[in-house]
Image (cartoon, rainbow, N blue to C red):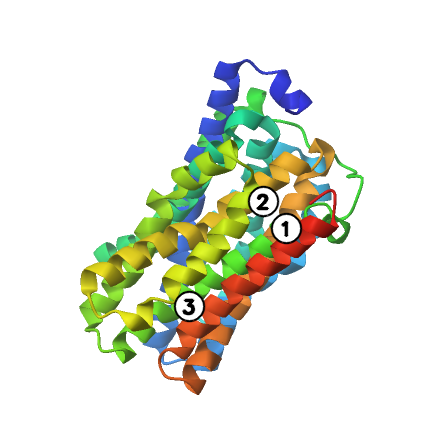
Amino acid sequence: MSAAALALTPRQRALSIAAVVASTIGVGISYGIGYPITALTFEQWGAPTWLNGLVGSAPALAILLCLPFFPRLVGYLGTIRAMALGCVLVGSGFLLMPLFPSPEAWLVLRLIMGAGIALPWLVGETWINTVADDKIRGRMLALYAIALFSGFAAGPFILDQVGIVGWTPFVIGAAGILLAVVPIVSAAALAPSMPEHPDTGVFGAFLLAPIAMVAGVIGGLLELGHFALLPIYALQDGATADQALQLLTLFMVGGIALQFVVGWLADQVSARVVLIAAAFLFAAIAATLPMTDDPILRSAAVFVMGGLGIGFYTLGLTFIGQRVRVQDLAVANAAFLITYQVGAMIGPSIGGVAMGVWQPHGFVVAMVASALLGAFVMALVGRGSRRA
């Protein structure tokens, strides 16, 4: 347990973590609204698909470019001010989008919003890992992941209810991220400080917890690969449009519902063991998809796959908290987020290419192969590195 955690009573630790979890819901909602409202609006404008894709990838690109510098920025600004700054940037971006309705303006705004959201994302994870008791670290990070991905899932649902025209969706996106500031400001006295000059840089932090970095790549790859292509795979395999969307919903619901179980397992055994087992189990379950036409069995398989796929995120963060010194947590978490974004960017591409080679089951082959490769690499890294 870190010095910051030891300085707090159990009740203060609980309140500190609760503040971050509550804040994360708003962060997740704004993230979940930003992507679909951009894509749908560009489609409505008649923008070419390449431009839609470019603007869609802008937040991830901004996150990748900014994260190497953000640990020092957070140390300089302080925990609360850094999180608040990020939330204000994202909220302002939402409110400026309807005022500047052009692809060029939205490209700039989405870059700024991506950089902004990286701050509460990075600080929130580091905050929990700094304050959490080692005995329940996995479960506390599971609560964080549940809040984050619940917010992601709520975004498209909100847009389905209010539409994408007018100020309403943009105001909701801004309100979600700006209200996220309230819990963290309320818990300012319980916030851990972060070093202004970490002992290592972000790229050096990849070596501090290599298993977690592999987990980040695999988690982002599997998660975004399924978000982007699972409905298409189901349609090409004979499902109706409603059934295809239901499978995607089940993947997300499984990811949210099973995170606490994943975190509990990491607390009981070790994040490394659970990570390797989860990768093998994901591959085994995913491999059954082409073999069954039973909708109940397929739904159950996708539900568990969601829990395991999103579980890589929870487990990677837990592993970092278990193995990395507190003064290096911010840079290690930044490195983890970079690997997660890399996986998220390549997952849909790998799955799409594989589906083109063998339609539609190439998608399943690509996801199974990625999970198995991740399991073997994590096993080898764990054997060859004492710190891992």
Q: Nearer the viewer, residue 37 or 130?
A: 130
Nearest to the observer: residue 344 or residue 314? 314
Residue 90 in the image, given as x and y percentages of width and height = 50, 50
Q: Which mark is residue 387?
A: none
Q: Are marks 3 and 2 in contact (CB under 8 Å)?
A: no
Residue at the spot of label 1 = 211
Q: Residues at badges 2 and 1 in contact (C-beta under 8 Å)?
A: yes
Looking at the image, which residue is at 46% across and 29% down? 19
Snapshot quadrant of residue 42 = bottom left
Instruction: Mark 3 vs mark 2: give the one in front.
Output: 2
Q: State whether residue 10 is above or below residue 107.
A: above
Left or right placement of residue 90 versus residue 30 in this view: right
Q: Amino acid at mark 1?
A: Ile
Residue at position x 37%, y 50% in the image:
255
Say whether residue 9 is left or right of residue 355: right
> What element does badge 3 sit on?
loop
Q: Is residue 383 visible?
A: yes
* Residue at disc 1, secondary structure: helix
The one nearer the camera, 267 or 165, is: 267
Q: Is residue 100 visible?
A: no
Instruction: Give the x, y percent position of residue 270.
Output: 56, 38
Whether residue 156 is situated above or below residue 347 in the rendered picture: above
Q: Check disc 3 and report the residue beneath it.
A: 101
Furthest residue toward bottom = 357
Q: CA distance from mark 1 to mark 3?
A: 43 Å
Residue bearing the label numbered 2: 272
Which residue type carries mark 3? Pro
Q: Quadrant of the N terminus?
A: top right
Give the percent coordinates (x, y) of residue 81. 60, 35
| Measured Cα–Cα span from mark 3 to mark 2 | 47 Å
> Along the line of sight, which residue is nearer the eye, 40 or 367?
367
